[in-house]
């Protein structure tokens, strides 16, 4: 049974058992075996320009006895994490997302974000279905597609058009090892992934936009 625990500045997604995890996370990227996925909330003051971020994070994880965890960083207030579970047939997809859009981008363009806080959209997905290592990247492609669709539907305008993500997004996909070879949009797996991730990311994006408006109104 998967479980999400908030222990600020940490957010822990316990996968319930050891799984294969595909990600480009800062700690343990690529395809690894892991029992949990972590988020570490940071502020600009935590990460000065001359900091060895890998070394700093390794120390933080060592202190938490969590060097084995796939770990992502975000400056989003992780108290506003969003999660959604979808069941399609026998497939359960459990998505957890932290959504900050302060460094939003539209794909194919770049905005100068120097001197600003960075948000990041970090998504972790747990599947109960056993995938092959060829189906795992296909599952990740559905996560990315669903995340992008949700950000588009949140309708954050940029000079180049609506935002499609941020410059520092990260995705982690976990599943048991298995013999399922396909996870596209025509499959129950693809439908479950898409619905779970889309719902969680859209909820997180709308919450970020509400928070940002409230902060702006309070300062004016």
Image: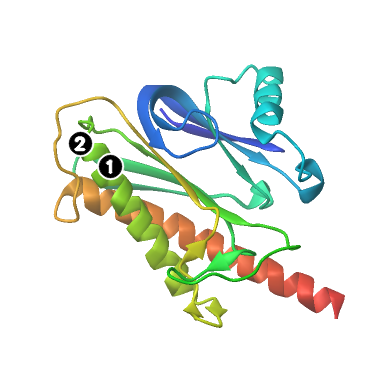
- What residue appears at the point 39 percent right and 25 percent down from the top-left corner? 32
Q: Is residue 5 above or below residue 147?
A: above
Residue 116 image point, x, y percent: 73, 63
Dot 2 alpha-carbon crowd within 10 angstroms: few under 14, some 14 to 19, many 20 or more: few
Q: Give the vertical position of 55 relative to 92 (above or below).
A: above
Q: Quadrant of the C terminus?
A: bottom right
Drawn side of residue 112 relative to residue 131, left or right: right
The label shown at residue 88 is none
Number of residue marks: 2
Q: What distance separates the C-alpha of mark 2 from that of mark 1?
A: 6 Å
Q: Nearer the viewer, residue 33 or 110?
A: 110
Q: Crowding at label 1, few (<14), some or many (≥20) Cα neighbours within 10 Å? A: some
Compared across the picture, whether 217 is left or right of 161 comes to right
Secondary structure of residue under mark 2? loop
Q: Position of residue 83 (x, y in %)?
A: 48, 48
Quarter of the image where the N terminus is located: top left
Q: Residue at x 71, y 29 (%)?
A: 56
The location of residue 112, given as percent across then percent down, is 64, 69
**Secondary structure state at the residue bearing disc 1:** helix
Whether residue 93 sits left or right of residue 155 in the image: it is: left
On the image, the x and y values in percent for residue 102 come to 65, 64
CB-based contact (under 8 Å), mark 2 and mark 1 = yes
Q: Which residue is mark 2?
A: 134
Q: Residue at x 70, y 74 (%)?
A: 213
Q: Residue at x 39, y 53 (%)?
A: 197
- Quickly name the residue at label 1: 137
Q: Which quadrant of the structure image shows residue 191?
A: bottom left
């Amino acid at each position: 049974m998967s479980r999400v625990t908030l222990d600020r500045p940490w957010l822990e997604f316990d996968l319930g058992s050891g799984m294969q995890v595909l990600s480009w996370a800062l700690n343990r990227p690529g395809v690894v075996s892991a029992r949990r996925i972590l988020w570490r909330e940071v502020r600009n003051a935590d990460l000065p320009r001359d900091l060895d971020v890998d070394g700093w994070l390794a120390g933080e994880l060592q202190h938490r006895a969590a060097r084995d965890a796939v770990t992502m960083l975000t400056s989003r207030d992780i108290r506003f994490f969003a999660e959604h579970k979808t069941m399609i047939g026998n497939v359960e997809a459990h998505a957890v997302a932290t959504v900050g859009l302060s460094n939003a981008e539209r794909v194919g363009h770049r905005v100068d974000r120097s001197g600003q806080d960075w948000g990041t959209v970090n998504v972790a997905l747990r599947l109960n279905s056993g995938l092959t290592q060829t189906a795992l990247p296909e599952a990740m492609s559905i996560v990315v597609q669903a995340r992008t669709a949700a950000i588009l539907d949140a309708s954050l305008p940029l000079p180049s058009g609506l935002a499609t993500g941020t410059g520092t997004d990260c995705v982690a996909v976990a599943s048991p090892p298995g013999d399922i070879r396909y996870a596209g949009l025509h499959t129950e797996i693809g439908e479950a992934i898409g619905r779970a991730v889309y719902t969680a990311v859209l909820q997180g994006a709308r919450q970020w936009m509400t928070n940002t408006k409230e902060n702006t109104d309070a300062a004016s």
